[in-house]
Amino acid sequence: MSRKKLRRFAELETLPNFFRYFNIGKGGGWIRDYFANDRALTLELCCGKGEFSLELAGIFPERNVLGIDRKGDRIWSGATRALERNLSNVAYLQTDIEILGDLLDENQVEEIWVTFPDPLPKRKQAKHRILGSSFLAIYGRLLRPGALIHLKTDAEDFLDSTLEGLQDEKVEIKLIRKDIYASALGDPLLEIKTDFERKHLAEGRKIHYLAFSFKA
């Protein structure tokens, strides 16, 4: 492991807005205690450096935002920048999504964002996709009724396969936009760009968006 990663891991242990799954116990009381309120959460899954979570928290100071990723060295960037900007309404959690249902409460989440996940294109990888059936079962328990799940991706094949998989789920498609920058967006949230998105746009890739919710 590089010295840079070792330094970041050591620093993470001192950050008040960073949590690891094995230190927080079960249920969502830990995050309510951190924010000191009962507001519902906005989650960014596979948040990487936490840029999207950071910008969400800045735009919506009345929201509680939680960025989640399995790699702590990625989260370090967002967690440190949040403290530098005095954003007290955003925190970061290092965990695998598979156990997220044990770490939060039922109906504790008002919105989920999935920004540029690994598309895992091979057929045998389908069950591991972040919007696959087993993961949707977790989100369905955590989300409040009518809450939205948002996806931004540069992989049109992944978007199409996600839509195909959702046909077998009890969900309602709210919006599909392919090549979102081909026309005026009209939504400031879609204009938030991560490093991944900037890289994709510089390479000439198109960005796509999907929003859906679970049926009552």
Image (tube, grey):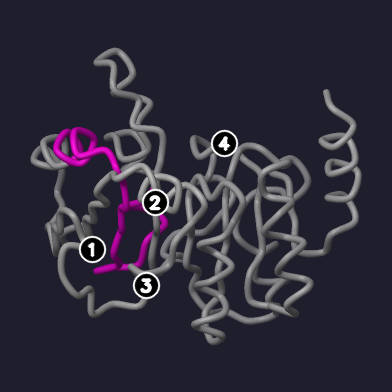
Residue 66 is one of the magenta-drawn residues: no
What kind of residue is marked 2?
Val
Q: Residue at x 66, y 64 (%)?
A: 91
Q: Determine which quarter of the picture holds residue 30.
A: bottom right
Mark 2 or 1, nearer chain start: 2
Q: Crowding at label 2, few (<14), some or many (≥20) Cα neighbours within 10 Å?
A: some
Mark 2 residue element: strand
Residue 189: mark: 3
| Residue at mark 2 | 114
Cα separation, mark 3 vs mark 2, equals 13 Å
Taking the spot 69% from the left edge, 78% from the top edge, the residue there is 87
The residue sitting at the top extreme is 124
* Callout 1 amino acid: Tyr
Q: Nearer the viewer, mark 2 or mark 1?
A: 1
Residue 101 versus residue 81: which sits nearer the camera? 81
* Residue at image mark 4: 96
Left or right: residue 84 compared with residue 211: right
Q: Work out whether mark 2 precedes mark 4 in sequence or the reverse, and give the earlier one.
A: 4
Dot placed on the residue nearer the N-terminal end, 1 or 4 = 4
Magenta-tinted stretch: 139-162
Looking at the image, is mark 3 or mark 2 earlier in the sequence? 2
Q: Is 161 on the left-hand or right-hand side of 143?
A: left
| Residue 144 picture quarter | bottom left
